[in-house]
Image (cartoon, grey):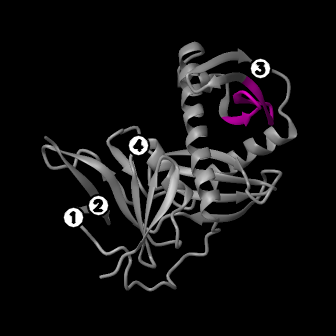
């Protein structure tokens, strides 16, 4: 019978236990935009859902249109995601002269069912702004911690503009990237970055393979030193790897994130 073991992580090293920020300087919190727990949960779930649809759409595009070299020849520059009442549309965008226009649409009735069609015409004002916001965010990443970054654009929770996430990514399924993620507040027209939030203190990477023989992970643990609650990328990571994530914040609070929900486990003391 296998023993269920938690994987604890600090500074890239795996340890058996650690204080969850107890006794730390609680003033050492970055000035990131902070949201209430429900908003963080909603944003994290939206990040995961849009990431899933974008990945599925890319697979369909590769299968039915061509591999990256061919798409580059067609001047495909990225995509936008549009949620409708009963469907999700992933629209791939190509460069046209000095502007951009729609190239391929993949319409999903569920994550498993997507239909590709060729698209033409022009982007709507909101679509164009969303695409510009995505391109701007890629150019505005302060420091790359991974060779690969995925971008996801969401409406700003304040009702105007966008929240653009630059998510450190890897093609290795055994790695869990806890750090390296940014959130950018972008203007409604997609032309100005109003704030860059670094959602991590250090670049933590966890390896699922680094487990004692005969054990399996029941969850991941990481300390979080830039806000007094988990952030939406923690929800995203938990959903992406289908594992609970335990976060210890700087004020000594322990949080559990599972299936898109965040709950406090109380304060931890020495």
- Residue 3 % position (x, y): 17, 48
Of mark 1 and mark 2, the one earlier in the sequence is 2
- At x 64%, y 65%, the residue is 35
Identify the residue position indicated by label 4 in the image: 241
Nearer mark to the viewer, of 3 and 2: 2
- At x 41%, y 77%, the residue is 252
- Near mark 3 (Cα within 10 A), the count class, few <14, some 14-19 or many ≥20, is some
Label 1: which secondary element: loop
Label 1 and label 3: CA atoms lie apart by 54 Å
- Residue 105 % position (x, y): 71, 23
- At x 36%, y 73%, the residue is 20
Q: Are marks 3 and 2 in contact (CB under 8 Å)?
A: no
Identify the residue position indicated by label 2 in the image: 8
Identify the residue position indicated by label 3 in the image: 119
Of mark 1 and mark 4, the one earlier in the sequence is 1
**Residue 265, quarter of the rendered image:** bottom left
Magenta stretch, residue numbers: 79-103
Specify whether 124 is left or right of 260: right
Of mark 2 and mark 4, the one earlier in the sequence is 2
Q: Residue 255: in sight, yes or no? A: yes
Of residues 39 and 80, the one drawn nearer to the viewer in this rendering:
39
- Near mark 2 (Cα within 10 A), the count class, few <14, some 14-19 or many ≥20, is many
Label 1 and label 2: CA atoms lie apart by 6 Å
Magenta segment's dominant SS is strand
Identify the residue position indicated by label 1 in the image: 16
Residue 100 on the magenta span: yes
Q: Quadrant of the N terminus?
A: top left
Of mark 3 and mark 4, the one earlier in the sequence is 3
Label 2: which secondary element: strand
| Rendered view: 113 above or below 246 | above
């Amino acid at each position: 019978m296998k023993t269920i073991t938690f994987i604890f992580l600090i500074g890239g090293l795996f340890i058996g236990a650690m204080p969850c920020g107890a006794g730390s300087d609680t003033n050492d919190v970055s000035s990131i935009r902070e949201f209430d727990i429900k908003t963080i949960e909603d944003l994290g779930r939206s990040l995961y859902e849009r990431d899933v649809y974008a990945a599925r759409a890319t697979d369909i595009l590769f299968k039915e249109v061509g591999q990256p070299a061919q798409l580059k020849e067609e001047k495909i520059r990225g995509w936008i995601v549009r949620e409708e009442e009963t469907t999700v549309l992933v629209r791939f965008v190509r460069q046209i002269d000095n502007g951009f226009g729609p190239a391929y649409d993949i319409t999903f009735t569920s994550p498993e069912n997507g239909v590709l069609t060729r698209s033409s015409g022009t982007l709507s004002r909101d679509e164009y702004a969303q695409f510009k916001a995505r391109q701007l965010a890629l150019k505005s990443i302060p420091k790359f911690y991974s060779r690969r970054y995925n971008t996801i654009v969401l409406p700003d929770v304040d009702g105007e503009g966008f929240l653009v996430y630059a998510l450190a990514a890897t093609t290795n399924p055994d790695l869990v990237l806890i750090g390296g993620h940014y959130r950018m507040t972008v203007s409604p027209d997609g032309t100005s970055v109003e704030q860059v939030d670094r959602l991590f203190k250090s670049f933590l990477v966890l390896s699922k393979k680094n487990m004692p023989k005969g054990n399996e992970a029941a969850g991941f643990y990481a300390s979080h030193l830039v806000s007094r609650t988990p952030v939406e990328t923690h929800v995203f990571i938990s959903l992406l790897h289908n594992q609970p994530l335990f976060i210890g914040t700087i004020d000594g609070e322990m949080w559990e994130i599972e299936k898109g929900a965040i709950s406090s486990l109380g304060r931890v003391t020495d």
